[in-house]
Amino acid sequence: LEALDVAAIREEFPILQREFDGQQVVYLDNAATTQTPDPVVDAISDYYRRYNANVHRGIHHLSQEASIAYEEAHDRVAEFINADGREEIVFTKNTTEAENLVAYSWGLNELGPEDEIVLTEMEHHASLVTWQQIGKRTGADVKYIRVQEDGRLDAEHARELITDDTAMLSAVHVSNTLGTVNPVSELVDIAHEHDALAFIDGAQAVPTRPVDVEDIGADFYAFSGHKMCGPTGIGVLYGKEHLLAEMEPYLYGGDMIKKVTFEDAKWNDLPWKFEAGTPLIAQGIALAAAIDYVEEIGMDRIRAHEEALAEYAYERLAEFDDIEIYGPEPGPDRGGLVAFNLDDVHAHDLASIMNDYAVAIRAGDHCTQPLHDKLGVAASARASFYIYNTREEIDKLVTALDDARQLFA
Ligand code: PMP
């Protein structure tokens, strides 16, 4: 695989030229949100400058143009993740909303005290809190597949926990804290052997590697546009058509109906049945532009770039014996992020010192509080990489960390 032309890529992200106190920003918070390249910003402004209008119901030219672009954005997403078509692609606000849509629409209606929901200990709160609450409301038990010392899921435990009582397995594809790339198609297979449904949280996976939902076999799969060069306010729920067709709508209102009387209503076709009200028009169109952008670079090459940076960061951080790194050793089952702690320095203090060097990292529990409890820490610092990051930026992080050590020594 040919390496990314990072210098050329960086040209399309003017934000990366910003300076704070004379230092150029080193943006290493990509697992939280990525930056937006000019072509995507252009797609948004082009929409507002040239064809802004409400979709679906318009007869006039502007509405027709907006409708076509918005509807075709669903086709673009379907093609990108290899879904069967736009019927399987629901636009949501983000991964969290996709998770809630299925939990409310399917979970509340289908689950009962005899059922079990299986999650992993490394779930993001988007899935953990959602299914936990649906469990409380329906009486379904929630169980967690163990995370081993090495940051990987305990495969035997997964086989023990997923049984004929399991109704839903929800698992994260790539952990936003440990970086672990989970064997999702195997997990989905186990769920299916027991007639359970499987939901995969792809928020960190879709931006960083080729994802083929047919290959994975999951019933539902979700991701967010803002972590892959797209705008905020757009996420995707992929669902198998026959399941979405049977599910109750999550939100009611305009656009999601075919016919309404004073007594009752009939639902619109997929995916519009799940997109009540004026949808995320500009955001959806811009998501399609973001997909064009990352695919043009190449998802295989992006994955290779991520793995190489993660490996380099891991090795540089491992040079310090007072730094603890979480998650698996570098390799194909580690994504492009590294969470760590320096001795007993609070992660927030570390991030604050990094900020003095204009190095942007995350500090906190990264929406995985129970996992942090298990790791025995309240918080961790996290550096996460994307297509525009370089080894030199990781060197800057390491230099800043070294200075921080002196300060706290
Ligand atoms: N799952 C994972 C693994 C994530 O990393 C994130 C974002 N931190 C989410 C879900 C939630 O994404 P969003 O905030 O866009 O809903």
Image (cartoon, helix red, strand yellow):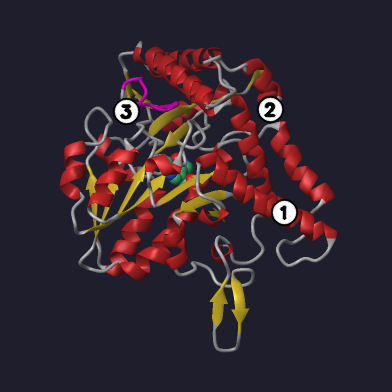
Number of marks: 3
- Main SS, magenta region, reads loop
Residue type highlighted by circle 3: Gly
Q: Which residue is disc 3 drawn over?
A: 327
Position of the C terminus by quadrant:
top left
Question: Among all residues in the image, which is located at the extreme bottom?
Answer: 263
Q: Which residue is disc 2 drawn over?
A: 13
How crowded is the residue under tag 1: few (<14 C-alpha within 10 Å), some, or many (20+)?
A: few
Alpha carbon distance from label 1 to label 2: 28 Å
Residue at 51%, 37% (x, y): give it: 32
Among the two numbered marks 3 and 2 on one chain, the one whose residue lies closer to the N terminus: 2
Q: Does the magenta portion include 152?
A: no
Residue type highlighted by circle 2: Phe
Does 237 sit above or below residue 290?
Answer: below
Residue at 41%, 45% (x, y): give it: 201
How crowded is the residue under tag 3: few (<14 C-alpha within 10 Å), some, or many (20+)?
A: many
Q: Does the magenta portion include 330?
A: yes
Query: In front: 57, or 175?
Result: 57
Does 286 sit above or below residue 16?
Answer: below
Query: Which mark identifies residue 147?
Result: none
Please say whether residue 222 is visible from this viewpoint: yes
